[in-house]
Structures are given as C-alpha cells and as structure tokens.
C-alpha cells in the first residue's frame, strides 16, 4: 500500500513537529514582550524628562532646596518697630529731642534715628509736617533723606540717612572761615536745596550752619525740618516767631507776615559767616541782637571779593532780597558754577570731609545750643548697642513694643501714607545681605543641577 504524499507536506505534525511549534511560539511571545517593554520605556522617557525638568525648576525657584542644604535667610526685621534697632551713640540733642546713631540690628549701613518725646504740650502738627517734608526730601539730593517714621506710646521716631561728613558748624569751628571756592560750592548746593523746597511750597525757617550737613564725599544736605512750614507759595504768607535768633529775618522779629524770603535772609547770614568767621549781628544781649537785625546794616569788609561783597548786601525789605528777587544763579559770584552738572551731582566738591570713626561721629544737627557728645560719652558706647528709654516718663526700662502701646493722639494718624513701606528700608539696609544670599543660592543651584546631570 502506497503512502500518499501531499505536496504541502505531511498533515500529521507528529510529536517532534508539535514540540518545535511550541518552541517557536514561546520565542515569538518573548520577542513581543521585549518589544512591548521597549515601547513602554520609550513612552515613559518623556514623562521622566518632564519630572526632572519640573524638579530642576522647583529647585531653582526655591533657592536650591533638596540634596543641598542652604542657610535660610534671617527673618525680616520690621523697620517700623524700635525694637528692631541697635542704638550706639548720641549724635545730637536739642529742644526737639535726640538724634542717635543706629543700625537695623547688626546690619549696615548706619542710620540716624531722631526721636522726640510725646507730651501734653507736643505740637502734633509740627511732628506730621516734619514727617511729610522728610518724605518729600527724597526727591532732592541736597536735602537730608528720610527713610521711615513710626511711633511708640511715648515717642515719635524718624529714620534718616546718616551723614558722616560733619556739619558746616563743625567746619567753621575748625577753620574759622572758608576759602572762596568752598563758599561758592557749598552755597550753590544750598541754593539748589532751598529752591527745591520753595518750589514745593515749603519754607525751612531754621536755616543755620548746624543744619547744613555733609555726606562722606563733601556734598551738602539741608536737614532738620522740625520748624518747616508747608503750603507757602508765591503770594502766600505765614506768621510766628520761630528759628534761631542770630539767623532770624527782620520781619519775623517784627512779628510781621513773611514768606520764603526769610530763608534767603538766613542764607545770606550763613554766607557772611563762611566768608568772615563772624556773625553780622552779634551783640552782647538778646535785645541788642534783635534791635541790630531790625535796624543796623551789616559791616561789609573791604578785603572781601567784590562779587561776594555784593552778594552779602542783606536787604531788610523781603521783596528786594536776593533769592526772592531775580535769579540768584545768575549772580556774578556763581559765574564759574555749572548748574546742570551740579544738580546731577557730577561736580567734584572742593574738600573731602575728614575721616571719622562712624560710631564716634557727632555730626547730626548740632549748634551752639545743642549738647555735644563728649569723648567719654562716645567711647563709653563704642560698639555697645543701647536703647533710649521708652518705658514712660521718668521710668527707665526696656523699649515698649509699638504694637502693644496704649493709644495716643498720634496713634490714629499714618505719618507716612506711602513712606512707611518696609520694602523701602529693607532695600537700603539689606542690599549687601541679599547679594550674599543670592551668591549662596546660585552656588547651591549649580550643585543640584550637577547631581541631576550625573544621575540621569
């Protein structure tokens, strides 16, 4: 019997063929599983990249947190709380209160903190006026810059720039009188400051050498706005016996209405003292000084420069007074002054203030009536923070927190509506700290990114 063969092969697989088919089937299954895993891996790879990218961005935003530990920034100090400041020494004292050298804790730069005690007789209108003028002063580089104002139960505080170059009073005390170049430069900068104030409707009313300060480069700053008067524009006038006697204008002493001309009278007295080392009206008694200012003509020495002699013609009548009449910048005495360069602070001062130890500096707002810190006072506080008494009248103790103080007439008033923002003072006092922190953060980010790159 013949075996019939199919051209398609034997239909009966038999034991060996069945085993072979099972083996091929298993190999096909393994190959499909392998390909599936590869596809799954390829599909998951973008997600993994996304996760790494998200993590990288998160590390960048959070300042390098994660595998690298970065020192957290110190808590933000409240520049509107007296407990945030370290006080080092007294810079000046007068009827207004005191000015202290301070820092926002241990952070530089130094600031000057002026504080006055609130009493039943406190003129809160003047307190607010000084705060408002300090705010406006930030628009002019020839005025002492204010940073913030706040209060406690017993005190009102003003935080201002610390001017380490001393005052014009100090310079005249040391040199007696100044050379012509210094008189030109200092008085020109004073003109810029006064014209700015008068343009804002503000008269200073207490201009004198003790209120003309120098920064570390030798540029002047007009300071102490405690007696300033606002809203006195051309055509307006005010009254009141205010100022320092030897620098007061005749119309104030005569109890007449007055305007910005009183500042130009005081300005003329200052120039006279810078040029001669003397006051034009300086008699033995208070009554004689008043009579002399109202009636006498100042002695103009022949040895003075001709243009300076003309500038010193102090006019008794306010309307004829240089500064109010005509453009004082066009006076021949200022022919060498480039006013554009001066106002942009590109002009080089004719002198460099003497180097002072910052802690020992005693430059803020001093005159003959103010207490001058002695060397023993300065050395006793050198490097040792102290705090002015704020526990209450005649009650020495620790500073009271402004947030828990009982109400006072000033508590319901916001001294600086847009000026007490903490960011303003923090940007100034913490700039160096922020730069150091940014360097640390960037270094940490570089380490984190390197670790991510090594592990990927």
Image: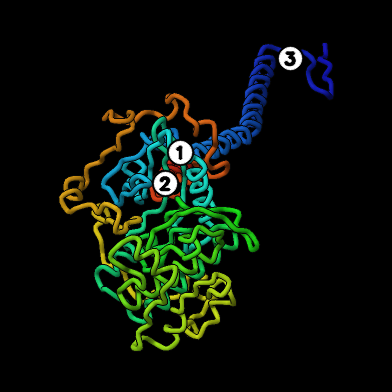
Classify residue 286 by image quadrant.
bottom left
Question: Quick check: 145 left or right of 178?
Answer: right
Q: How many C-alpha atoms fall within 10 Å of the one at disc 2: few (<14), some, or many (≥20)?
A: many
Answer with mark 2 or mark 3, whichever residue precedes in sequence.
Answer: 3
Would you say the residues marked 2 and 3 are in contact, meaning their CB atoms lie under 8 Å apart? no
Residue 229 against residue 194 in the figure, above or below: above
Quarter holding the N terminus? top right
Q: Secondary structure at mark 1?
A: strand
Residue 345, numbered circle: none
x and y percentages locating residue 83 in the rendered image:
36, 34
x and y percentages locating residue 182 in the rendered image:
37, 77
Classify residue 280 by image quadrant.
bottom left
Residue 394 against residue 385 in the figure, above or below: above
Q: CA distance from mark 1 to mark 2?
A: 9 Å
Q: CA distance from mark 2 to mark 3?
A: 103 Å
Q: How many C-alpha atoms fall within 10 Å of the one at disc 3: few (<14), some, or many (≥20)?
A: few
Would you say the residues marked 3 and 1 are in contact, meaning their CB atoms lie under 8 Å apart? no
Q: In front here: 40 or 26?
A: 40
Residue drawn at (25%, 61%) of the image: 356
Residue drawn at (55%, 69%) of the image: 318
Q: CA distance from mark 3 to mark 1?
A: 102 Å
Residue drawn at (26%, 39%) of the image: 386
Q: In front here: 26 or 72?
A: 72
Q: Can residue 255 be seen at all in this image of the molecule? A: yes
Residue 150, numbered circle: 1
Nearest-to-viewer mark from 3 and 1: 1
Residue at numbered disc 3: 13
Q: In front here: 303 or 11?
A: 303
Residue 159, numbered circle: 2
Answer with mark 3 or mark 1, whichever residue precedes in sequence.
Answer: 3
């Amino acid at each position: 019997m013949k075996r019939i063969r199919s051209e398609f092969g034997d239909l009966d697989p038999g034991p060996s063929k069945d085993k072979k088919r099972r083996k091929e089937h298993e190999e096909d299954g393994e190959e499909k599983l392998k390909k599936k895993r590869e596809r799954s891996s390829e599909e998951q790879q973008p997600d993994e990249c996304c996760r790494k990218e998200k993590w990288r961005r998160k590390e960048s935003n959070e300042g390098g947190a994660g595998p690298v530990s970065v020192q957290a920034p110190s808590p933000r100090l409240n520049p509107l709380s007296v407990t945030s400041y370290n006080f080092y020494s007294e810079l000046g004292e007068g009827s207004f209160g005191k000015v202290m050298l301070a820092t926002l804790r241990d952070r530089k730069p130094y600031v000057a903190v002026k504080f006055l005690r609130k009493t039943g007789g406190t003129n809160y209108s003047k307190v607010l006026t000084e705060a408002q003028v300090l705010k406006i002063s930030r628009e002019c580089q020839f005025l002492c810059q204010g940073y913030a104002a706040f209060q406690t139960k017993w005190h009102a505080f003003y935080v201002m720039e610390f001017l380490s170059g001393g005052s014009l009073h100090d310079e005249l005390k040391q040199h007696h009188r100044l050379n012509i170049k210094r008189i030109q430069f200092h008085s020109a900068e004073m003109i810029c400051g006064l014209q700015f104030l008068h343009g804002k409707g503000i008269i200073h009313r207490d201009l004198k050498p003790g209120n003309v300060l120098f920064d570390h480069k030798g540029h002047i700053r007009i300071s102490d706005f405690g007696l300033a008067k606002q809203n006195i524009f051309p055509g307006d006038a005010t009254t009141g016996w205010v100022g320092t006697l030897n620098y007061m204008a005749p119309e104030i002493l005569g109890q007449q209405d007055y305007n910005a001309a009183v500042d130009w009278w005081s300005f003329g007295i200052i120039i006279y003292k810078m040029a001669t080392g003397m006051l034009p009206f300086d008699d033995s008694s208070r009554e004689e000084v008043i009579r002399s200012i109202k009636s006498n003509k100042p002695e103009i020495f022949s040895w003075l420069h001709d243009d300076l002699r003309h500038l010193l013609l102090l006019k008794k009548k306010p309307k004829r007074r240089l500064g109010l009449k005509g453009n004082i910048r066009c006076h021949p005495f200022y022919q060498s002054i480039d006013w554009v360069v001066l106002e942009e602070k590109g002009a080089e001062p004719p002198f460099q203030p003497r180097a002072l130890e910052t802690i020992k500096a005693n430059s803020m707002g001093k005159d003959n009536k103010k207490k001058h810190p002695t060397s023993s006072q300065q050395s006793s506080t050198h490097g040792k923070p102290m705090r002015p008494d704020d526990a209450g009248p005649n009650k020495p103790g620790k500073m009271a927190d402004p947030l828990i103080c009982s109400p006072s007439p000033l508590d319901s008033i916001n001294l600086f509506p847009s000026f007490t923002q903490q960011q303003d003072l923090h940007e100034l006092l913490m700039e160096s700290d922020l730069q150091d922190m940014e360097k640390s953060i960037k270094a940490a980010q570089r380490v984190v990114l390197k670790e991510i790159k090594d592990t990927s």
